[in-house]
Image (spheres, helix red, strand yellow):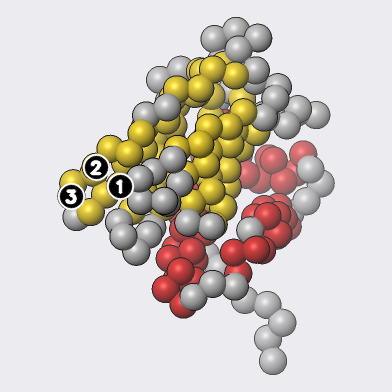
């Protein structure tokens, strides 16, 4: 009986090189670094494990997308000028999605959350204008087929070293709660 499984992930040469350098800096193998990321993600989202089969499949697709996005964002930041990376926690339909958001002027991060009644799309832009305050712009819509119906577009000005949140109360009772957590200090 096999004790482990193998997963292949395609990366560009630059991404693989950056990932190898990060692993070396942390004294780990690339596989060990990726396993650690997966274990962290799974432990943060363990509460989502028990849900109806349709949600399980949708959650698995979202988890894979978020993991790849998380890894891509991490590598992107390491290849550039180290802008701040916030952790965005989205509570929707009783589930919590956690994903990274890079605070860089002109950079928009898009999250697509599968749902039975149409995907929820969250476009997020964070700008750290100065050391005291940052601004986050969220554009949220629900896509059915090709049409994306706007839900809300809150703008949040916050202290970059503190947790900030905003709640969107929908008429259908399917509220959306967004929470930004500050970047962890780099060592």
Q: Secondary structure at mark 3?
A: loop
| Badge number at residue 80 | none
Foreground tag (2 vs 3): 2
What is the number of the mark on residue 149?
A: 2
Q: How many marks?
A: 3
* 3D distance between C-alphas at marks 2 and 3: 10 Å
Residue 68: give x, y in percent of width and height: 50, 52
Q: Secondary structure at mark 1?
A: strand
Closest to the observer, 68 or 46: 46
How crowded pointer 3 is (Cα within 10 Å; few <14, some 14-19, many 20+) is rated as few
Does the CB distance between marks 2 and 1 fall below 8 Å?
A: yes
Q: Is residue 50 above or below residue 81?
A: below
Q: Residue at x 66, y 63 (%)?
A: 46
> Dot 2: what SS?
strand
Q: Which residue is mark 1?
A: 142
Splitting the image into 4 quarters, where does residue 22 fall? Answer: top right
Q: Earlier in the sequence, mark 2 or mark 1?
A: 1
Q: What is the spatial separation of the Cα atoms under label 2 and label 1, in whole angstroms?
A: 5 Å
- Mark 1, residues whose alpha carbon is within 10 Å: few (<14), some, or many (≥20)? many
């Amino acid at each position: 009986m096999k004790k482990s499984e193998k997963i292949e992930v395609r990366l560009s040469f630059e991404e693989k090189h950056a990932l190898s350098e990060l692993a070396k800096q942390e004294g780990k193998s690339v596989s060990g670094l990726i396993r650690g990321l997966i274990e962290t993600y799974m432990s943060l989202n363990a509460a989502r494990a028990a849900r109806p089969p349709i949600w399980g499949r949708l959650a698995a697709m979202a988890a894979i997308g978020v993991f790849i996005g998380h890894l891509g964002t991490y590598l992107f930041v390491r290849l550039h000028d180290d802008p701040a990376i916030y952790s965005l926690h989205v509570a929707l339909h009783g589930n919590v999605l956690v994903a990274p958001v890079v605070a860089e002027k002109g950079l928009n991060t898009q999250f697509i959350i599968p749902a039975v009644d149409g995907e929820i799309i969250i476009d997020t832009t964070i700008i750290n204008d100065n050391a005291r305050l940052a601004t986050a712009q969220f554009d949220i819509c629900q896509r059915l087929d090709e049409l994306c119906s706007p839900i809300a577009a809150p703008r949040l000005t916050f202290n970059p070293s503190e947790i900030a949140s905003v709640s969107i109360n929908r008429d259908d009772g399917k509220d959306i709660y967004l929470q930004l957590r500050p970047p962890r200090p780099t060592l």
